[in-house]
Amino acid sequence: MKLPFPLATLAGVLTWLLVSGITLLILQRLPGPQPWLPVVLLLLLYGGCFIFLTQESSSSLALKQRYGHYLLAVQLASAFGLLWVLPTGHFDYLAILTIIWVSLLPHIMSQYKAILLAAVVVVVWFSLQAVFEQRSLWISASLFGSFHLFAIVMQSAIFAEQQAKLKIASQHQQLQAAQHLLLAASRQGERHRIARDLHDLLGHHLTALTIQLEVARHHSDGEARLQVEKSLQLAKLLLSDVREAVSSMRDYADLSLAHLLEPILADLPAHLNIELAIPADLTLPNISQAQHVMMLVQEAVSNTLKHTKATTLSLSAEIIHDSDKAELLLCITDNGMLADNWQLGNGLTGMQERVAECHGQLILQKVNGALQLQIRLPQEVINA
């Protein structure tokens, strides 16, 4: 099982195992009957919740998924359950379990809210323990409270670093994509310049030569006339070839969609598998549409990495012909889990605005629990 923050998760699991082992060892040495079954069940429940919450998968039990918050509450309840059922005066270290619990909070809420919630947990925990043991525990509460604060601050720093790395990686991909697009635009511009020069210079001279040969044909006869007519036919054929070459260079689009998306889909996290279904000969009509498509795909990939915990991202594209018009159909989906109460964020709103600028259509639908994006863009010239 691959974990999003393996060192922190491993430390949490080892700490839970150590607390569990010490608890069972102490319980064994206490005289009289002891609540073995509830203690073992609560310890297993706590550890199971922690492992499920910290796994990196599309499971609905993961921390940021559909039932993650409920599982987080169950984990805390199991810790309080141990405080309730265990004999008093022997297990002062059990608050370590709440330290492990609060270390998860920065991944689902702000640092300020996490600290407030941790303070409430510490106050309630040591208030109950003080009532059970009939003694003051303000020193222990202060010490463990500082440990809770330290855990939250450290995990907040780790989470902020992860987000910063994702942002830098996204910006780096955008820069590479922009450079790639600029190079393609430069090649296309150079090709158009060459086509224009061929038309204006070589085409002009060939036209003048054809006219001169027409005049020479009318002023010659015999063998000379035959040679002039052959030269005239060759000149006309050459002029036709030049015009065809110029038209081909102007019409040819060096904007292969699969080639343009290479910088965006390269260097993605190892856990995200890309399934690409784009014909090699699918090209975009102009630089404007190429830029829009690249930005749309970039935003879709960023949303997948940030919000879905998906392991597979599928991207397909095709040209759909309908009567006298053609559309580019771009489908993007992943195998992540979409929350039931999901709402449009800034990313999807920006995608809608960009598609609207292209006079296209963005269709959002839920397929097998994941969000699928269908983008339709006209293949005509886009004034965006």
Image (cartoon, rainbow, N blue to C red):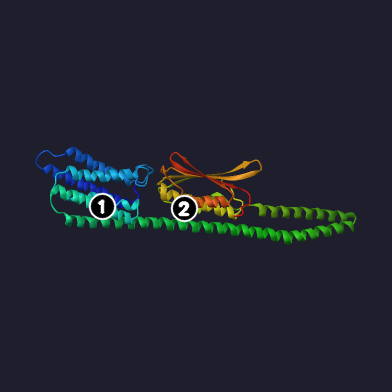
Q: How many marks?
A: 2
User: Image quadrant for the N terminus?
Assistant: top left
> Relative to residue 85, is residue 71 drawn left or right?
right
Residue 34 placed where, x, y %? 14, 39
Dot 1: element: helix
The residue drawn where x is 54% and y is 57% is: 180
What amino acid does circle 1 point to?
Val
Kind of residue at badge 2: Asn
Label 1 Cα neighbours within 10 Å, binned few <14 / some 14-19 / many ≥20:
few
Q: Residue at x 32, y 57 (%)?
A: 112
Cβ–Cβ under 8 Å for marks 2 and 1: no
Residue 96 visible in the displayed image: yes
Tell me where residue 73 sits by quadrant.
top left
- Of callouts 2 and 1, the N-terminal one: 1
Residue name at image x 78 percent, y 58 percent: 207
Quadrant of the rendering where the C terminus is positioned: bottom right
Instruction: Judge by depth and name the residue closer to the eye, 212 or 91.
Output: 91
Please name the residue that numbered disc 2 is placed on.
346
Estimate how packed mark 2 is, as few (under 14), some (14 to 19) or many (20 or more) residues with alpha carbons within 10 Å. few
Q: Nearer the viewer, mark 2 or mark 1?
A: 1
Residue 181 in the image: state x and y as whole percent. 55, 56
Residue 175 picture location, percent across and down = 49, 59
- From the viewer's perspective, tell me whether residue 119 is left or right of residue 343: left
- For mark 2, give the secondary structure: helix
Q: Viewed as shown, does residue 238 lie left or right of 263?
A: right
What label sits on residue 120 in the rendered view?
A: 1
Q: Nearer the viewer, residue 158 or 244?
A: 158
| Residue 144 location, quadrant | bottom left
